Image (cartoon, helix red, strand yellow):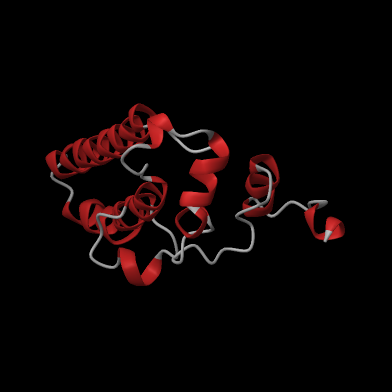
Amino acid sequence: MALNREEWERLEEIRNEMNDLLEQAEYLVRKSGQKFELERARAYWIAGMENYLGEGRLSSQLSGCSMEDTIKALEPYEGEENMDDEDIALANADHLSPAPDCDDPTVDMPLDEQIARERGANTSYDDKE
């Protein structure tokens, strides 16, 4: 099932809100006056989050699939409101396949297993293949 325009716009809003919160966090670290901590934060978690959101200077090279890439891939076509799910799936067949920038093999993995894998836990996903 594809996202409708309202759902897709909400996803964009969430991304923008996350970006705004990141800017606020950077401001607070900068306000502390501790230049070393600011530079360390910019070099690691700020840069990483910017890249994952699709805002970073290196987002297209480093993050195989930024949030911006996902949002672009999920954008509904005009006129989808008048189509049934099967017609939308056919119209978006290439558009809704894993996004070209998303070459992560865990993309079809259930979210809880993705989280467990990232935390280093053994998962049953490998056994299912």
The image quadrant that residue 77 belongs to is: top left
Hey, which quadrant is residue 65 in on the image? Answer: bottom left
Q: Please tell me which residue is depicted at 20% across the width and 36% down the height of the picture.
A: 24
> Percent x, y for residue 60?
32, 67
Along the viewing direction, whichever of 47 and 84 lies nearer the viewer: 84
Residue at figure coordinates x 29%, y 53% from the top left:
50
Q: Residue at x 33, y 51 (%)?
A: 68
Q: In the image shown, does 33 or 129 lie closer to the viewer?
A: 129
The furthest residue to the right: 127
- Left or right relative to 45: residue 114: right
Q: Quadrant of the C terminus?
A: bottom right
Q: Is residue 91 left or right of residue 41?
A: right
Residue ID at (21%, 43%)? 26
From the top left corner, tell me how far across and down residue 46 is, in percent. 29, 52
Residue closer to the observer: 116 or 87: 87
Residue 38 to residue 58: above or below: above
Q: Along the horizontal axis of the image, is 67 left or right of 24?
A: right
